[in-house]
Image: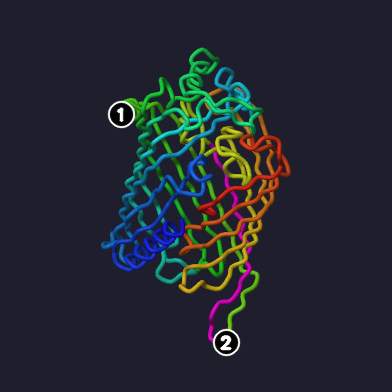
Amino acid sequence: MKRLIAMLIASILVLASASASDWHFWGKDLDQHPEILAGFLPTYLYGGVGYTGFEILDGHTTDLQLMAGGGYVQRKLFQDPATGESSPEPFDGGPIIYDLVQIDWALKFLQGFFDSPVEPGDDLLTITLAYEGKFEGNMDSRVAGKVKKNWGSATVHTLDDYLAPVAGGAYPNLYPDLKGNHQFLGTNLNLGFEIDLMTDDIETNDGFLLNLDLDWAPLALNAALDGEADFYSVVFNAVGARTLYQYNDEGGKHWFSISLVDRFNINWTSGDMVPVYAQKQGSLGRKVRGFASYSYNSEFTMVNNLDLRFTSPAIGIDGLYFRLNLFFDMGYGAGHFYNTEISQSQFLASTGAQISLTIFDFIDIGYQVAYLMNGRNYAKGDTPFTHNFIFFLDF
């Protein structure tokens, strides 16, 4: 395990040194399988390479990006396959649980506009056009046939058993990308706008960052590629940050800082066939920390995440820091549950702490403990306390 962590850090150092040229590399996402080393070992990696060697507008960044990734992960779903209701016990006392091999890719074009008033040489506005693709091979869970005590001693079923009630239920498009347990190729188009007024050097955070993302996955485009998807998504993010305190020595070396960071997110995701991968991004349970992804799946969500961050001095190398993050989250969901005509509203709230090793401000390897103030983590039973490994702070 120590060798794995050392190799991960060494790889990041190599990529970071390469980013000084026209080519730049970064990690975008990590995921883990909870049945493999209790979720500590990443089993899914997603990253990208970008080229900024030419400019369409003088003095403003033009960035061509290729992103790709893949791995082996697990999913837990919490809508009843027969009725479409959101429930902690959708199938014989436990959630729907299955495994998949997942491959993702994206082609992106980013263009900057206007000069940043806070960071000389940076762009104030960036517009993104992107095509995103996905290939998934769904299969039975590694623990199919075993009993899970957390879910009322429920037995983990095969994927075919889970899908049988969907075919005969009220909403046959509840899980469109799982129909017939087939492999799935999905595509969607993305248009993004970002206004950057943020100064972020890991040690301190000050300013504002605004994002608007529009995603569209039309049925005609997906059906032509043997996919099952027909949805659209509108996501708005606003992040504000303020450094409350920083201590530097006489030589300017950073020793300690405290920052307040607040993120406000509004999401509307809807359509005739919202696939499972899109349900994760829109689910209220994913955005309010301490709850389970794919839970509280409603079309509209509004979430506020408040962080108080304590950052240590650099650990041997600039870019490596320990960080303690105290958080308080609130979220509201409303509208129809995905792919149904069932409407329901819900309010979630949680508080807790994260301690992590921050590596060049794009990955945080650590541990999270949360107390659920309102709502229930469907994957953890009735306990108001949850804990898990983390790889990203997300904001």
Disc sitting over residue 250 in the figure: 2
Q: Residue furthest left?
A: 54
| Residues in magenta, as a range | 250-268
Residue 145 vertical position relative to residue 39 in the rendered view, above or below: above
Q: Secondary structure at mark 1?
A: loop
Question: 389 or 329: nearer the eye?
Answer: 389
Please state the horizontal and vertical placement of residue 365, each as a whole percent of the image.
51, 57
Tell me which amino acid carries mark 2: Glu
Residue 253 vertical position relative to residue 122 in the rendered view, above or below: below
- Main SS category, magenta section: strand
Tell me which amino acid carries mark 1: Leu
Residue 395 vertical position relative to residue 314 in the rendered view, above or below: above
Q: Residue at x 40, y 33 (%)?
A: 217
In terms of sequence position, does the residue under pointer 1 or pointer 2 come before the other? 1
Q: Secondary structure at mark 2?
A: loop
Please state the horizontal and vertical placement of residue 200, each as a whole percent of the image.
51, 66
Question: 117 or 69: nearer the eye?
Answer: 69
Question: 259 or 383: nearer the eye?
Answer: 383
Rounded to the nearest angstrom, the CA distance separating label 1 from label 2 is: 62 Å
Disc sitting over residue 225 in the figure: 1
Q: How many marks on residues?
A: 2
